[in-house]
Each structure stands twice: as structure tokens, then as C-alpha cells.
Amino acid sequence: MAQKPSTPKGTRDFNPEQVAKRNYIFNAIRGTFQTFGFQPIETPSFENSSTLMGKYGEEGDRLIFKILNSGDYLAKANSEAYETKDSNKLISSISEKALRYDLTVPFARYVVQHQNDIEFPFKRYQIQPVWRADRPQNGRFREFFQCDADVVGSKSLWQEVEFIQLYDQVFSALKLEGVTIKINNRKILSGIAEVIGASDKLIDFTVALDKLDKIGEEKVKEEMLNKGIPQSGIDKLKPLFTLSGSFESQIESLKGILETSEEGKKGIEELAFINTAISELGLNTTTLQLDVTLARGLNYYTGAIFEVAAPKTVKIGSIGGGGRYDDLTGIFGLKNVSGVGISFGLDRIYLVLEQLGLFPETVTKNVEVLFINFGDKEALFSLKAIKELRLHGINAELYPDAAKMKKQMNHANKRQIPFVVLVGEEEINSNMYTLKNMNSGEQFKFDLEALIVHIKNIE
Amino acid sequence: MAQKPSTPKGTRDFNPEQVAKRNYIFNAIRGTFQTFGFQPIETPSFENSSTLMGKYGEEGDRLIFKILNSGDYLAKANSEAYETKDSNKLISSISEKALRYDLTVPFARYVVQHQNDIEFPFKRYQIQPVWRADRPQNGRFREFFQCDADVVGSKSLWQEVEFIQLYDQVFSALKLEGVTIKINNRKILSGIAEVIGASDKLIDFTVALDKLDKIGEEKVKEEMLNKGIPQSGIDKLKPLFTLSGSFESQIESLKGILETSEEGKKGIEELAFINTAISELGLNTTTLQLDVTLARGLNYYTGAIFEVAAPKTVKIGSIGGGGRYDDLTGIFGLKNVSGVGISFGLDRIYLVLEQLGLFPETVTKNVEVLFINFGDKEALFSLKAIKELRLHGINAELYPDAAKMKKQMNHANKRQIPFVVLVGEEEINSNMYTLKNMNSGEQFKFDLEALIVHIKNIE
């Protein structure tokens, strides 16, 4: 026998149970996006390379999957690169398309391309796969879904308030308790950098600060010093390392640290506005927490920064994130379109729900009734009933072959089908159906109408 | 300003209205698959090239999108091919992965790979995009969705009966009347080829016969003669060209033509079985028609062949097809797994529904209520109400900025939002909401409970 075939490294098949569980999460997210007024769009799986390249930094460019041109692609190969066998330099002459790396850049491209047809502010959501040539590892794949919602064309902070509510509603719908929504603001980070005399080292500063949880205060200070941040500045950070307590008390501490920074004060004002609104509106199952060390995607975000942490009992990274960016579409020539957006990490949410046993049992329920096949005459009689059952929304099927009874019953058991119907000579003559409950073993005889009522009452 | 970005040739963006309409079709298909007992699986967008190459013929191989290896891909380039600049020969050394070309080969790979975990007969459905480097033209795209359902592990003809019922139920659900389900059988075609002394020219024979509709009887005969089919054989085809009337009368004519062919008679028997069962079970909106010229995918199908034709008023090709294949998984080393399957052509069904005006108006309904934003105090009051509305399943949103009233009303009109709610000082003080019906212009004041009831009653 030939070698068993497999999927490429970092990719996965999903079996029926996994698809059902994934759809359970997708539906919760999609449904909430819709009640919040977001509209779906979809973009192609591949884009022109020029749309993607240079948008994610050098590392990102390397991780983008490139599609080889069709036909005699070497005919147009860059001859210098070809002669020197320069893989990197040759790419653009033999590959014009590339697989989507995220949903944000294609969305920016969409907005610019269709700007005349879009009514702003535009609230869109998008749930599609993306591809990255990353080294596969536990929980990191080369093909995975992103679930994004963004608003473009408004600077209103009410959107930030709405997104926090949205996170809360999705995790409530999934019955996942203990989720923390962390929030920070780019302006706070810029303000702190300004105050400690490290405005020109904002990235180094935030990269180091971001590691506080992992490496501790002393190592963070060491790294800052190594990056050229003055000791006098680092000393001013003291209150930052010990920030704790309620959102409000942290805001008060920050006011002290940032009193000389206009930008920092603006950041505080924004955070306070959002926190006040959320306090008024209330959250169901999540908690909003100010985390001044949060700096994800800093190059990109200009205002609020979000990151969502799974319940502490589950050892897993963030399950969502996002923020405000003031110039998303500028890369495609459309200036002054402010946006804010969030994303859900489907694969990680899946792992969390699995670990906590939060998938409802009904999610993987598929076929409810299997009709045992005793021969062509019985099969035809059965299919007439099956047709009626399906019209009543009951998932039903006929075992295709008149195999041995035991084999058919085993099939029902293995597929966890809760009911089988037995139709033999006697049932046909009396126009009745024998229903067997596969869990209890009980058997009843019903006419078609009673059969439907019985199954519908139990499911 | 930079040049407006665009999508690659043959690919499409879908705006919210298009996504909603496509989902309407997907949901009808998916829902029916499920009531018929099919279970969903998903496979990765790209496969190892060895899984795909050589499975679709030379033309197919050309049309498969290849993904360039990551990193220094030229390091492993085949040096002979590199020196002679042989694009075709170089591919396998610089590209190990390729985008899915259809859902059938990945499904075969899935069945072989997971054979020990699958309970046969296995009824699976799969709704995912596929990619082909075809020349884009009207209604043909480089990225498009396929919607497939297959059963593997049973030779029972009841599956063919079920698939015809399934087609009927999907098109009934879509309220599309006048669809014809054409059926043929590979064994009939083999039998005819045998009878006319052209068994060794089965492909040439069926390719010519398949053109009967387009080029007429005389040209078909000419082509057959050119391909070396003897005149004496072609003469025997006379009754075939004039086959008409009911399914039953066509079966009778075929019995005459095929009385010396065992295989042909087996084909007739199968068709008759299916037709009798369908007559007993009945079809809602579709018609089953025997079409002996139907030969699609002949290399592949071994029994029944299906093709679904749109209503005659719509000039469009087939909107679905399928058939039985006796050795799907043989290509991956697993012998004797018979299968039968069908496919729906999403893009064409979309065009048909659009042309006939069959998309329900409610499909594109999105946001039901927009709250006008008069300022922060009013916005917060509004968001409290919006939260309640959403919990009652009403899609509601707040205009993010306290822009001019006219601008906000225009926004509601352009997005075809049916209701706006106005909340000012007076409403806050009296805890009431002014609801304006954007179609009739009528305005009413409600408390929150009455507001919810009113909107839910009208939607």
C-alpha cells in the first residue's frame, strides 16, 4: 500500500466534531458582531504582492506565503537575481500574488478601493483564514482563522466603549467566566517616555516594559539602561512598577507621573472616559483592567490598546486584542481615516472552552434518527417517513445497505445516534414505526405523526 | 495620491449585501445537508503538491496554484532545470505546496489518512473555496466556493435516490422552480460504445455525443467518424438521437438498443430502480430527466452521472453535478471504497436567484435601529437602552459622533436602517424614547419596554 498521505506542516484537518465546536464559537462571535451593527465583508484569499509586502516589517515579509506565477514564470525572471541565485531578490519577478497574512491590510485595501461606495462610519466584520509561514508549534498554525471587527471613519471614544461591551457579550454568550479585558493607551506610553527623557526610545522602552510580567522589575530596568535610557529617567518609573488597585486609583497615580506631559494627560482623559462609561453600563462576566505595561502592536496603534486574557486557571496567552489606529488606509493613499478594531483568537478560545468543558453537549449532536434497512421494500417505506421527519427539521437517514441488523445497530452506536427506527413487514402492514431509544433500550410503536412528536419532544 | 489598489485578476471582494446573499444560499445548502445526515469536515487550503499533482490531468496540473517554498528556496533548486530555465521542471524543487483545486481529492486524502477513525459509510459535506489559475471570464473565477456532499463506503443505489431528493429540497428551500435534474449512467454509455463497436473509443464517443445539444446530430456523427468510429456503428445510434418522451419510454428504447450488452443492461436496471423510487417519493419543484448524452467527468464516474440545469428562462450552464465513482481513494492506496457525491455551484445559483429576483428582502436587512447621538450624556443613556435591545435580539447601534442631525439621518437612510431613536434632554428626564419610522416618517414616544415590543412586532 502507498504511504499514507498527510496535510502540510502547520495545517489541520477538522473532523465533524471539531467543525461543530468551531462553528459554535464562530456563531457566538458573528451573532454578537451583528447585534452590534457590524456588517460582513469578504476579501480574496490572495492579494497582489504589492498590497501585502512591506506592511508587516521584514519578518512579516518573510512569513508571507508567495504564489508562483502560472505558465512559463521563469521567462520574466530578474536575470541578475537569477544568475546570482538570490532567492529573495528573485521573488518579485516570479511571484505576483501572496496569501493573506492578516485581515487588517486587506480591509484597508478594501476601504480605499471601494471608498466611493462605502457609507462612513463603516462598521465591518470579517471572519476568514490567514496564512503565515511561521515555525509551527503548540497552538501556532500556518493556517488559522481571524475574527475581526473594525469601525473606520470616526474618532469617537464610544467605539472603544462598544468594543469592551462586545467582548463582554461574546464571552458571556460562550459562558466563559473570568475573562479580563486589559486596556492601555499609546498616549500614556508616549507620555511616560517623554517624562523620563526617552521619547526617541519609545519602542525600546515599551518592549522592555512589556516584559515586566515575565522577567521582573530589575531585569526590565537593566534592559532599559542597556538601551540607553538614563538612570534618572528609570528612577522616575518607580511608581509605575508598583501601580495596582482599582482602575480609578491607577488613574490617580498616573496623573501624578504624567502631570508634565500633554499627551500623557490626553491618554489619561481617554481612559477615564471609557472607564466611567463602562462602570455605568456594566459588564456581565468580564473585568476591565488598566495595564500600563500593555504595548502590543505599538507601531500601529495610536490610542486605545486592548488585550484579552483567558481566565487565570487556564495557562494560555491572550485570546483577543486590538486598538485604535489613526492612519490605517494611509498606506494606500487615503489619509485621515481613523479606525479602531478588535480581534478574537478562535484557536485559543477553542482550547480554553475544551479545557474548561464549556462546549454544550448539543453542539456535536448530528443525526437524530437512523432507519434500519431491511431491504428495498422497507427502505422505500422508510424513506417516505424520513422525508416527513426532515420537513419537521429532524436530521434523519436510512442505513444505505440491507446489512446485518447488528452491523447497522453498531453503526448507530458508534455515531452516537440517539434513536433508530425499525420498519419490517409488520410495520408496513400496520403503517407503524418501531422506535428504539439507543440509550435506554426502550422500544415504542408509533404512527408517523406520533413518531415526529415523540422525537421532537425529546431532542 | 497613490494608485488605487485592486484585487488580483479573477478574484472578488464581497460587500455586506453580497455576503448576506451568499450566506442565504450557503445556509439553505448546509441546512439540507444536515437534515440528510451529512457531517461537515474541513481540510487545509493548501495540500502537499504530491497530493494534488497528477490527479486532474495535464491541464489540471497547469491550473493548480503553486506556493513558493519559504526561505532560500533556490538552494534546493533542481540544477539541470535551473540551468536550462525549464519553468515546468523546476517547480517541484522550489514549491512543495499547492492550493486546493477541488474538494474531492482532499476528501479522498482525508478518508485515507483518517480511515481508522471514520465510521463507514461516511456521509460528509464540505463547503470551502478552491482555486484555479483559469483564464477569468464571465462567471468563471480563480477563487470560488464548492459545496460538496459525498457518501463513501456503500454501493447502495438508495444514495443516488437520496441525492436527487436532496437537490430537490435545496432548490425548494430557495424557492427556485423549474430546475431539471439530469441523470445518466456510465454503464449505459459503455454499453452503447460496446454495441457500436467502439469500446476502445469510449472517451471519443462520449465527448462527441456530449456536444449533441450544441452542434447537432450531423456534426456529432462527423466527429465520430473522424475519430475512427465505424459508419455501421454510427448507424446503430439513430434511435439514440431521437430519444424523447418520459423517463420510462426512454428506458424502453434503451432496452432495445442495449439488448446485447450486459453492462448496458445493468445501467438500465440502475436507472429504472432510481426512477421508480423517485416516482414513489415524489419531487417538490424539480424534474428528473434521463439524458443519455450526459457524460461529464467520465474518466472518473463509474455509475450514475448527475447534472442540474437552471430553469430554461435563465441562460446559464449547469448549477450542480455529480455521480458515482468506484475508486476514489485508490489514488492514495485504499482500494474498494465506492463513493457517490454531488456538488452545488454557488456562483451560478447566485446569478440565477439574482436574475429571477428570488432573494428575500429580509436577507440584506442588517441594522434595525440607529440611535442618534446628541452628545455624551445622551449617548450614555442611549447605550443603556441599546444594550437591552441587543439582548432581545435586535441589531442596534449608536451613531458614534455627535454630528449634525441631518448627517446622522442621512447615514440611516443610506444604510437603509428602518428606525432611528431620538434621545434628548426631554426623553432622558421622562425616561422615554422617540422612535421614528424612516419609511413612513411617523414618530412615537415609548418607554423602553414598549420600544422593544414595537420594533420586534414590525421586523
Image (spheres, coloured by chain):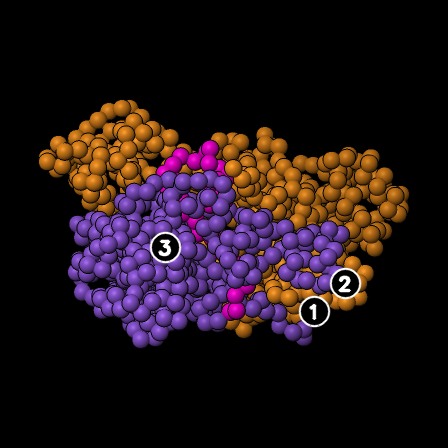
Chain colours: A orange, B purple
The residue at 28%/59% (across/down) is B195
Residue A368 position, x and y percent, is 31, 37
- Decide if residue A252 is in sight here: no
> Which numbered marker is on residue B322?
3
Of callouts 2 and 1, the N-terminal one? 1
Query: Does the stretch in magenta take in B186?
Result: no
Query: Does the stretch in magenta take in B121?
Result: yes
Q: Quadrant of residue A111?
A: bottom right
The residue at 30%/31% (across/down) is A408
CB-based contact (under 8 Å), mark 2 and mark 1: no
Q: Amino acid at mark 1?
A: Lys
**Above or below, B85 relative to B219:** above
Count of marks, rendered view:
3
Question: According to the image, label 2 marks what residue?
Answer: A82
> Which numbered marker is on residue A76?
1
CB-based contact (under 8 Å), mark 3 and mark 1: no
| Residue at mark 3: chain | B
- Decide if residue B323 is in sight here: yes
**Above or below, A374 relative to A328:** above
Task: From the viewer's side, name the closer residue of B171 and B94.
Answer: B94
| Residue at mark 1: chain | A
Q: Amino acid at mark 2?
A: Tyr
Q: Quadrant of residue A444?
A: top left
In this picture, which residue range is highlighted in magenta? B108-136
Q: Quadrant of the C terminus of chain A?
A: top left
Residue A189 position, x and y percent, is 74, 50
The residue at 52%/37% (across/down) is A1
Assign a secondary structure to mark 3.
strand
The residue at 40%/44% (across/down) is B124
